[in-house]
Amino acid sequence: MSEVNIRDYISQGISNLKQFKAILRQNLIRIPTNIITDEFAFSLAPEGWNFYRDLVFECSKKSEITLENTTFFQFFQSKQLNSVCYLNDLLFIHDLERKNRLSHNGFNFYLGTYPWGGWTKEEASTGGKPFGHHYDRIEGKMTRDLWGYGRNPFYKPKDRHTLECELKVMQELYPSLKKGYYPLRYGFPSVTLLVRQNGEMRAVMGGGHHRLSILSHLGYERLTVLLPESYMGKVFESEVAQWYYVSRGLCTPEQALEIFNAYFDLNGRERLAYLGLTSIY
């Protein structure tokens, strides 16, 4: 090995060591995969349904997959989903009585906002990071590219470009993770924990939704995840009075807890059934 190569090798080793130490300084926890859900309560539990989890299953079964024939595509093309304006609508799209009651008598949360504010410490103190086609129309904003165009299927669900991007990501990532999962090299998925007074928890995905869906499909029953310092870490039911929208009198504690409890009571199957769709996993 030449002197130059030795220096490069040592430099890379030092860089990797620094990254490893940085990871160790973070708050890593190991959790059951079946308590993981997403920001709209589409669960990775065996009894639940998650659109990415569904898509990876179809990618694993078909070498050449047609987007139009996937449940993923049909879900995001549905008229009901594309009529969603608020978080309230999306969580309770299958429960018209509750959806209408919350819409007429409660506070309407834009997508990206929650009774506790949002998922990061900054969002918790500012009321979240609102987005969506409806939000832009009402508020005169432009949030389509908030995470990059094609990166958010809920901005305008029927947008074909975004759905094609999601399929491409899954087709590329699934074969890679199937060969091996190396979070120390590529980083750990991040979550925020919702904690009930009885200690029951849900882990809401932050970064790593695609990876977590694939790992769930591959049979990982427990996973090590990250509670980033920039994230809230935990949202406690017992602290409902201090949540952003409750403490400001915009949302009642009762409505806030109805949304909070939705992450424990819903798993995605109820909305899939309401839309008249079926899943092959």
Image (cartoon, rainbow, N blue to C red):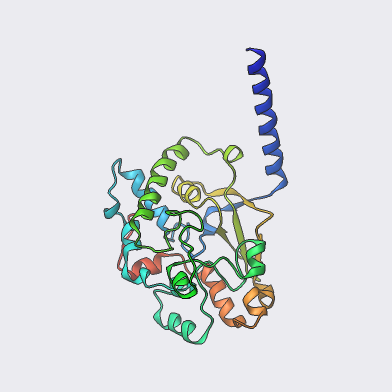
* Residue at figure coordinates x 45%, y 45% from the top left: 218
Q: Is residue 227 left or right of residue 43?
A: right
Outermost residue, bottom direction?
A: 105
From the image, which quarter does the C terminus lie in?
bottom left
Q: Is residue 131 left or right of residue 183?
A: left
Rendered position, 100 above or below 279: below
* Residue at figure coordinates x 49%, y 82% from the top left: 102
Rendered position, 13 above or below 35: above
Residue 163 lies in what quarter of the image? bottom left
* Residue at figure coordinates x 69%, y 33% from the top left: 17
Outermost residue, front direction?
A: 140
Q: Nearer the viewer, residue 127 or 37?
A: 127
Residue 199: % across, % down: 65, 66
Rendered position, 257 above or below 162: below
Q: Nearer the viewer, residue 242 or 238?
A: 242
Q: Nearer the viewer, residue 21 or 260?
A: 21
* Residue at figure coordinates x 60%, y 66% from the top left: 118
Residue 242: % across, % down: 69, 75
Q: Is residue 272 left or right of residue 215?
A: left
Outermost residue, top direction?
A: 2
Residue 186: % across, % down: 57, 40
From the image, which quarter does the N terminus lie in?
top right
Residue 204: % across, % down: 56, 60
